[in-house]
Amino acid sequence: RIAWVKYPGLPSDSQYELAKKYCPKGTCGVMCFGVKGGREASIKFMDSLEFATIATHVADCKTLLLHPASHTHRQLRDEQLAEAGIPGDLIRFSVGMEDPDDIIADLKQALDKIS
C-alpha cells in the first residue's frame, strides 16, 4: 500500500552516503512516503488518521503527518506541483515520542481504509 519511501537512513536512499557522513549517529525521525493510488488515496489516508496529528511543521515530540499537495501547496495545479517536486501521493511523516505500537496501529488502520 506504500509506493515508495524517502529516508536518508535507508541504504537504498540516494542521500544515504551523505547521511552517514554528516549524521554518523543516525538520522532523525522525519521521512516521506507515497501512498499507492496517488493523490486521492493519499487524501483518504490522511482523512482516516485517528491518532497522529495533521500539521504543517515537523520535528515535534508528537507524531505529525502532512499531505503537501492538499495542504501547504493546495493552490498549485498538478503541473506546478510536479515542477516543484511534490508528487500527489507524497506524505511527510515525523515520528513522535508516543508508543510505537500506537503510531503503527494508526497508520495501518488508515491504510486499511484505502485498500
Image (tube, rainbow, N blue to C red):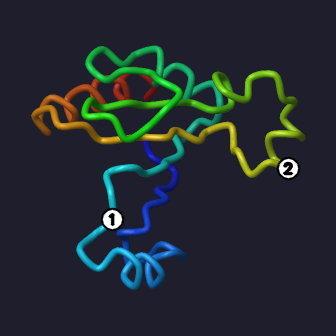
The answer to whether 77 appears left or right of 35 in the picture is right
The answer to whether 41 appears left or right of 80 in the picture is left
How many neighbours does mark 2 have within 10 angstroms: few (below 14), some (14-19), or many (20 or more)?
few
Residue 113 lies in quadrant: top left
Q: State whether residue 93 is above or below residue 105.
A: below
Percent of width and height locating residue 88: 68, 37
Percent of width and height locating residue 114: 45, 25
Q: State whether residue 78 is above or below residue 46.
A: below
Which quarter of the figure is the C terminus placed in?
Answer: top left
Q: Earlier in the sequence, mark 2 or mark 1?
A: 1
- Residue at 46% across, 24% down: 45
Residue 87 lies in quadrant: top right
> Marks 2 and 1, how far apart in space?
27 Å
Nearest to viewer (mark 2 / mark 1): 1
The answer to whether 12 appears left or right of 88 in the picture is left
Front residue of 92/34: it is 92
Front residue of 12/108: it is 12
Which quarter of the figure is the N terminus placed in?
Answer: top left
- Residue at 41% across, 78% down: 22
How many neighbours does mark 1 have within 10 angstroms: few (below 14), some (14-19), or many (20 or more)?
some
Which element is circle 1 on? Answer: loop
Q: Which residue is mark 1?
A: 27
Residue type beneath disc 1? Thr
Residue type beneath disc 2? Glu
Percent of width and height locating residue 56: 53, 27
Residue 83, numbered label: 2
